[in-house]
Amino acid sequence: MKTILTLAFALTLCFKSFAQEDTTKTEQYCELLATQKLFSSKVTITIDFGDKINYWRDNRVKDSLGQVINFNSVVDAMNYMGKQGWKLETALLLGNGPYVYHYIFKKTVNKSDLKED
């Protein structure tokens, strides 16, 4: 009888531990900015994930090893975003002199995967 009660108690604990993860889906957005360099055909790529910007720290996009990712073009950066699971929502062109292209991306994630602010 004790064995059955112990087994039932252990199974109850296992089911409770699975119930703690929040699998509710939410949408996350980011903005890819492509700024045309002055007197050049090259562009500078910046990706804004909504994190607080620290001007004393290197804010460039890095891979899983911490190496800075250099993009060859806007399309290269967009392909990178697609591989990370981001989907293009809209694209805008703003500016009179050096143009700034804004690309808005969206990704659906579990709420449990989001970092706390």
Image: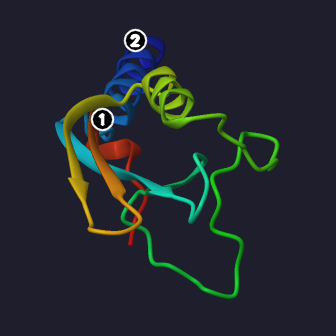
- Count residues near mark 2 (Cα–Cα under 10 Å), then give few for <14, some for 14-19, many for 20+: few
Q: Residues within 10 Å of mark 1 (few under 14, many from 20)?
A: some
Quarter of the image where one finds residue 98: bottom left
Residue type at numbered disc 2? Ile
Task: Residue 2 in the image: state x and y as whole percent.
Answer: 44, 19
> Does residue 19 appear to the left or right of 70 in the view shown?
left
Colouring method of the image: rainbow
**Residue under the image location 24 percent in, 52 percent down:** 93
Q: Residue furthest front?
A: 39
Vertical relation: 37 (above or below) 108: below
Name the residue at 43% across, 69% down: 51
Q: Secondary structure at mark 2?
A: helix
Q: Where is 102 relative to 16, above or below? A: below
Give the mark, 2 or 1, whose residue is nearer the N terminus: 2
In space, the residues marked 2 and 1 are separated at their CA atoms by 40 Å
Give the quarter of the figure containing the C terminus. Answer: bottom left
User: Which label was assigned to residue 109?
Assistant: 1
Along the line of sight, the residue nearer the viewer: 7 or 70:
70
Closer to the observer: label 2 or label 1? 1
Residue drawn 29% across the image and 34% down it = 107
Q: Which residue is mark 2?
A: 4
